[in-house]
Image (cartoon, rainbow, N blue to C red):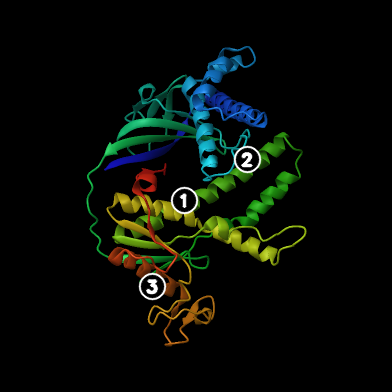
Amino acid sequence: MLRLQAFRFELLPNGQQRHAMCRFAGACRHVFNKALAIQQENHAAGKSYIGYVAMAKLLTAWRNGLETPWLREAPCHPLQHALKHLDQAFKNFFAQRAAYPRFKRKGRGDAFRFPDAKQIKLDQGNSRIFLPKLGWLRYWNSRMVLGEVRNVTVRCVAGKWFISIQTQRDVESVPTAATSAVGIDVGVVRFATLSDGTPVEPTNCFKRHQQRLARYQRQMSRKVKFSKNWRKAKARVQRLHVRIANMRRDFLHKASTTISAGHAIVCIEDLQIGNMVRSARGTVQQVGKQVAQKRGLNRSILDQGWGEFRRQLAYKMTWGGGTLLAVPPHHTSQTCPCCGHVAAANRRTQAAFECIACGYQNHADVVGAINILERGLRLLACGEPVHPGHSVKQEPADAIGQVCPAQ
């Protein structure tokens, strides 16, 4: 099996290298925004979409022109990759997979990529890496980089620079040693409940730091915008956001690793999280109801990281030789696993389940996990839909299972 994996490290640049990376990120942002503006003007004039090849010719003129001569100081390949990034964003928009591309802001998502592996030299013994026009950069070598280096991405997060080294290597496909199957019901009170009754308690990273974050944001709002004190307050808010994200990511990696290593088949709900967290504010003509309550529920759902949890489970199950199945989530906590009776009255409270037909009692989350497992096993055994009009799908390995993000 061909495995693509990224290894993420913190860079230790000197002052000159830090200044150069800021300039390179700014150049890539400028190229992206200028190309997006040209695409908008071209569309407004009624002309066809400009492809990457034609846009790359414009990049050559920008680098050699008199308006932006400083683009020549930045490496050429990262600038070309910024155009490829925009081209892919438009393709996703045309295929209705993403929203319309937006202009990039300074200080948010500053990054650039070196796609040519021939220009990259990795010296793991001395904890350094060579990049074009940057020279040798030192990094915190916390783990060994396995495989052949394919590309490198440099990114700034809350004032610190990180590098993601993507590698490629062939690994032997070994079947998993586990023989059990499990269903997972995700929630807010419980992060996850397994079909064997094992609960996974949530960390609620954002909720734990919500008051502190609000206090930092209030302090920032009282400062004069773009002053030195305002920038210090902004950096404090950014660092807290990064800490919350790191805590959530660490929790999700540990939970997904434990589950994927202990089971051969994992069945989860095919949740449409984007639809679940839509605002209930409504319009001026038709004002929504219980807006504050829905806002708090949306915040709790996003705090759990269900989408990231599913993505991590997908590639970890593929790497371990297991299978991940996503089943429709309809009526999972209202269906009796004993007699199959479906009724809203079966779930008397948030946690209590009692079938009005046969009297079966259990925790509602455990019942949901049992039904999710049953639907997944029905697909593997018979290949039939769970219910008419609903189908069960298996996560594709080529799209999500083979690529591991930087950890």
**Disc 3 versus disc 2: nearer the observer:** 3
**Disc 2 versus disc 1: nearer the observer:** 1
**Disc 1 versus disc 3: nearer the observer:** 3
158 relative to 323 in the view: left or right: right
Q: Is residue 186 above or below residue 355?
A: above
What residue is drawn where x is 74% and y is 45%?
A: 221
List x then y, in percent, for residue 403: 37, 43
* Residue at the disc numbered 2: 235
Check disc 2 and give the amino acid type: Ala
List x then y, in percent, for residue 103: 62, 34
Real-space Cα distance between discs 1 and 3?
Answer: 24 Å
List x then y, in percent, for residue 7: 39, 39
Quarter of the image that includes the N terminus: top left
20 relative to 179 in the view: left or right: right
The answer to which image quadrant residue 73 occupies is: top right
Classed neighbour count for the residue bearing mark 3: other residues with Cα under 10 Å, few (<14), some (14–19), many (≥20): some
What residue is drawn where x is 60% and y is 14%?
A: 69
Sequence-wise, which precedes: disc 2 or disc 1?
A: 2
Q: Secondary structure at mark 3?
A: loop
Sequence-wise, which precedes: disc 3 or disc 2?
A: 3
Check disc 3 and give the amino acid type: Gly
Classed neighbour count for the residue bearing mark 2: other residues with Cα under 10 Å, few (<14), some (14–19), many (≥20): some
Give the total number of marks visible in the rendering: 3
Q: Which mark is residue 197?
A: 3
Real-space Cα distance between discs 2 and 1?
Answer: 21 Å
Tell me, yes or no, if residue 208 can be seen here.
no
Q: Which mark is residue 401?
A: none
Sequence-wise, which precedes: disc 1 or disc 3?
A: 3
Tell me, yes or no, if residue 210 can be seen here.
yes
* Residue at the disc numbered 1: 249
